[in-house]
Image (spheres, grey):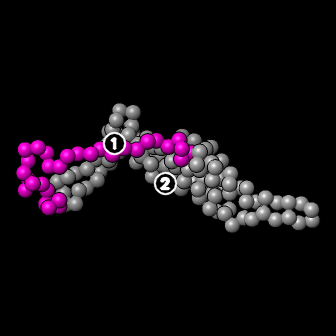
Amino acid sequence: MAATAEQIMRLRRMVAEADSTTYDNTTIAEYIERYPLLDELGEEPYTWDMSTTPPHQDVNTWWVPTYDLNAAAADVWDEKAATVAQDYDYSADGASFSRSRVVEQYERRARSYRARRSAHTIKQVAWPDEGNALDNRPAWLA
């Protein structure tokens, strides 16, 4: 799995990081790859080999790399807010400096992108299948 250059640039625009001064492309790609989604054909990013103990996860070669960029952007904004969380407001020589407002703005951006992230569901499978005895299950489930 690998984030494309287009996805990296799009996330950079979403988080106001035009260059790689703070976040290099590898770091941006790591944020993106945390949130794989079903592709447009309904393919999952991983397949599971249930015949091994424990089950083994493989990359689905049919899956077209599709990621939730909104969830990744929310994580980046959260991290950016954490880096300025120690900033404080102060007044000096008749001037007032509201540095804590930066944290509020970053947190607002994180909430905004988190609200737009893709819905997640899980697929529930009845176990054991009807007609199968409990002793037919794999050893790792016993």
Q: Image check: 12 left or right of 99?
A: left
Is 81 on the left-hand or right-hand side of 133? right
In the image, residue 138 lies in the stretch drawn in magenta? yes
Tell me the quarter of the picture where residue 43 sits: top left
| Image: magenta residue range | 113-142
State the predominant SS element of the stretch in magenta: loop
Counting every numbered tag in the picture gives 2
Q: Nearer the viewer, residue 8 or 142?
A: 142
Question: Residue at position x 63%, y 57% from top?
Answer: 80
Q: CA distance from mark 1 to mark 2?
A: 19 Å
| Label ID, residue 58 | none
Q: Amino acid at mark 2?
A: Glu
Give the residue drawn at x 43%, y 42%: 119
Q: Disc 1 marks which amino acid?
A: Glu
Which is closer to the viewer, label 1 or label 2?
1
Q: Which residue is mark 2?
A: 30
Q: Position of residue 96 (x, y in %)?
A: 85, 60
Picture coordinates of residue 134, whole percent (x, y): 9, 54
Q: Which residue is mark 1?
A: 44
Q: Please report the residue visible at 22 percent of the width from the left and 51 percent of the height from the top.
A: 49
Residue sitting at x 39%, y 33% = 40
Q: Secondary structure at mark 2?
A: helix
- Label whose residue precedes the other's in the sequence (1 or 2): 2
- Taking the magenta stretch, the answer to whether it contains residue 118 is yes
Q: Within 10 Å of the Cα at label 2, are there few (<14), some (14-19), or many (20+) other Cα atoms?
A: some
